[in-house]
Image (cartoon, rainbow, N blue to C red):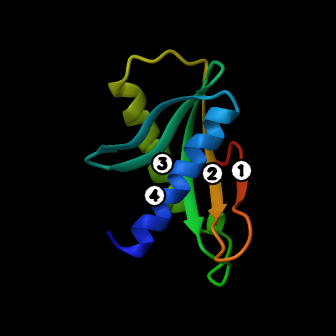
Amino acid sequence: MAHKDDVGRRGEDIAAQWAHRRGWEVLDRNWRCRAGELDLVARDGATIVVVEVKTRTGTAMGHPAEAVTPVKLARLRRLAGEWLATHETRASDVRLDVVAVLLPAVGPVRLSHLQAVG
């Protein structure tokens, strides 16, 4: 597995653990369909939360959350609709969040949560 894939997988693991500690029920990880992939789908009370996880080892190329563009958000909204259509899940609301994970070579992991981004 390439270094980039290892970094991404580690970030997704950290995000899933973070969601679990918040009391969210993780429903799906790395859910795939023809149109793409959702990193994390969780339940926060009555709300289904679709989480895009972006992980970087530094900020030379910008903060990880900056990689979530309007085009990416539109695709995630379509994927969320497909996920809901294929799962018998009751929810009063659906929310799209971004969890940005910084994994510096030295120092602690830093996680940022951007709620209801799309």
Q: Residue at x 55, y 57 (%)?
A: 11
Between tags 1 and 3, which lies in front?
Answer: 1
**Relative vertical location of residue 85 with respect to residue 59 in this rendering, above or below:** above
Judging by the rendered image, the residue that carries numbered circle 1 is 114
Judging by the rendered image, the residue that carries numbered circle 4 is 9
The residues tagged by marks 3 and 2 sit, at their Cα atoms, a distance apart of: 11 Å
Judging by the rendered image, the residue that carries numbered circle 3 is 76
The x, y position of residue 97, in whole percent, is: 63, 45
- Give the numbered dot on residue 90: none
- Is residue 68 something one can see in this rendering? no
Q: Residue at x 56, y 61 (%)?
A: 54
Q: Residue at x 43, y 41 (%)?
A: 29
**Label 2: how many Cα within 10 Å (few below 14, some 14–19, many 20+):** many
Is the Cβ of the residue at disc 1 closer than 8 Å to that at disc 4? no
Mark 4 or mark 3, which is nearer the start of the sequence?
Answer: 4
The residues tagged by marks 1 and 3 sit, at their Cα atoms, a distance apart of: 15 Å
